[in-house]
Image (tube, rainbow, N blue to C red):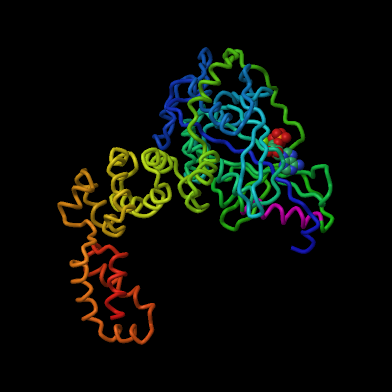
Amino acid sequence: MANSDKYEAVIGLEIHAQLSTNSKLFCGDATSFGAAPNTHVSPITLGHPGTLPKTNAKAIEYAIKMGLACGCTIAEDNYFARKNYFYPDLPKGYQTSQHTTPICIGGQVTIKSSDGEKTIQLNRIHLEEDAGKSIHDISPTDTLIDLNRAGTPLIEMVTEPCIHSAEDAFLYVTEVRKLVRWLGVCDGNMEEGSLRCDANVSVRLKGETTLGTKVEVKNLNSIRNIKKAIEFEIDRLIQLKETGGTIIQQTRSFDASNDTTFSIRDKEDANDYRYFPCPDLAPFHLTAAYIKSIQDQLPALPAALKKEWKVTYGLSEYDIEQLCEHKEEADFYIAWTLQTQHYKAAANWILGPIREYLNETNTNYAGLHTAIPYLVELLELVEKGVLSFSVATSKVFKGIMVNPQSPTKFAQDHNLLQTNSADEITTWIDEVLAAHPDKVAEYKKGKKGLIGLFVGEVKKKSQGKADPKIATQLLEEKLSS
Ligand code: ADP
Ligand code: MG
């Protein structure tokens, strides 16, 4: 866009993540997705008079986990406040949230942007309950209400206004989704609404230090849409500035059918939510010992693993990124490398034959841990040159998966071990050379590169059993005579 170089975009993101607890934040109603409408709605969820909420300790634990993983300070003294407003899907007439005392303060998330590593500063992570759902697209005349979701525990993660491109916003949300899944505190499923994002966007002239008037795009339910909505808003706001228009503080919504946004309401500066501490819920104190116990249970985080694997194991950036994509896979790699020092080979096995095998058999790593001692042995056979990589992957690995046993024994029983017997290899070499007289002639005329082809043919003929080093040596001797 013309003149867009003059401007800087400023973005702050609010992510709501549904915590993967079995029950709701203040009662025992189930949180499972997809139940028949209004079946998980006890009188507490419905806010009937006289009912008493009770805080779900698991939700607090999950919020602390996320906070610790992001380097937040955990508040020891907490309380829940009522945020009063009326909305049809809010049965109590208020939302129970944390007002001035978020459970996690500050913190950061690191992203790897195209122009280097960046730290996205967090303002807070707080606990609150979700509302129900208004459904506008089933009946042409009525709005339907499903209150199953009402009272589901959420954490809201709020960044500082420190993101400056749609691309970085995209990377940040991707990283947060990975982290909640890694920690097991949220399934990260955006299509089902377990992770939702509001994007606050403003623009200012480069070099300006005050923030421009922001607009907020609500309830973005895919990472792609977050990026599209922000791109659209940045362009729209710059256009407004360039044409002398006025930017008003607005709440907007994204229209995925044409990648644009539209206004849903102008936002008054101060909503009057009449916050006050919830009289039904006791304030809760977290002891330092409790917080430490959660810290101690945190799994190794991707950032630490990435560093270790790069420095100590010498893995490539690509391998590291791949292995840190899913925790089950990273855990498997960790377990395996506790028993072998062929770090790079183990990574190659996971990213190649093991992934392929899990895909083909539609299974996961859970069932593979007991096979680790056999895999350690299998790697050793390949590294020692006793077994070729292709025979190891195509025959031995599959064989020992079907019928768990020592790969050495399996290879012996099936006559698959590589041979370094010159006699045996020479027999294959003779057959290969006899089958390719033209190539032999070319080689003898000086096309030495053909040696690779001959070795390949010998490997094929021997079904992977010929030791390639010895085969090469014998071939060279034969062809030069
Ligand atoms: P609100 O009260 O409207 O929710 P907050 O101050 O709590 O506003 O901020 C909400 C989010 O908006 C935060 O992520 C914050 O970083 C971001 N934000 C605030 N002001 C701006 C601005 N002028 N431009 C872009 N983002 C902003
Ligand atoms: Mg807000």
Vertical relation: 238 (above or below) 39: below
Q: Does the magenta-highlighted stretch encompass residue 167?
A: no
Quadrant in which the C terminus appears = bottom left
Pick the front one: 183 or 474: 474
Residue 470 x, y percent position in the rendering: 29, 65
Vertical relation: 112 (above or below) 152: below
**Magenta-tinted stretch:** 228-241
Residue 324 x, y percent position in the rendering: 48, 45
The number of callouts visible is 0
The rendered magenta stretch, by its main secondary structure, is classed as helix
Quadrant in which the N terminus appears = bottom right
Vertical relation: 287 (above or below) 190: above
Pick the front one: 432 or 362: 432
Locate residue 175: give its quadrant: top right
Vertical relation: 397 (above or below) 292: below
Residue located farthest toward the left when viewing the structure as drawn: 413
Residue 369 x, y percent position in the rendering: 32, 39
Residue 100 x, y percent position in the rendering: 69, 23
The answer to whether 278 appears left or right of 313 in the picture is: right
Pick the front one: 371 or 478: 478
- The image quadrant where one finds ligand 2 is top right
Examine the rendering and report whether any part of residue 135 can be seen: no
Locate residue 416: give its quadrant: bottom left
The answer to whether 88 appears left or right of 267 in the picture is: left
Examine the rendering and report whether any part of residue 80 can be seen: yes
Question: Which residue lies at the image location 39% right of the left edge and 47% below the top edge?
Answer: 342
Pick the front one: 228 or 160: 160
The answer to whether 40 appears left or right of 284 in the picture is: left
Q: Does the magenta-highlighted stretch encompass residue 239?
A: yes
The answer to whether 311 appears left or right of 269 in the picture is: left
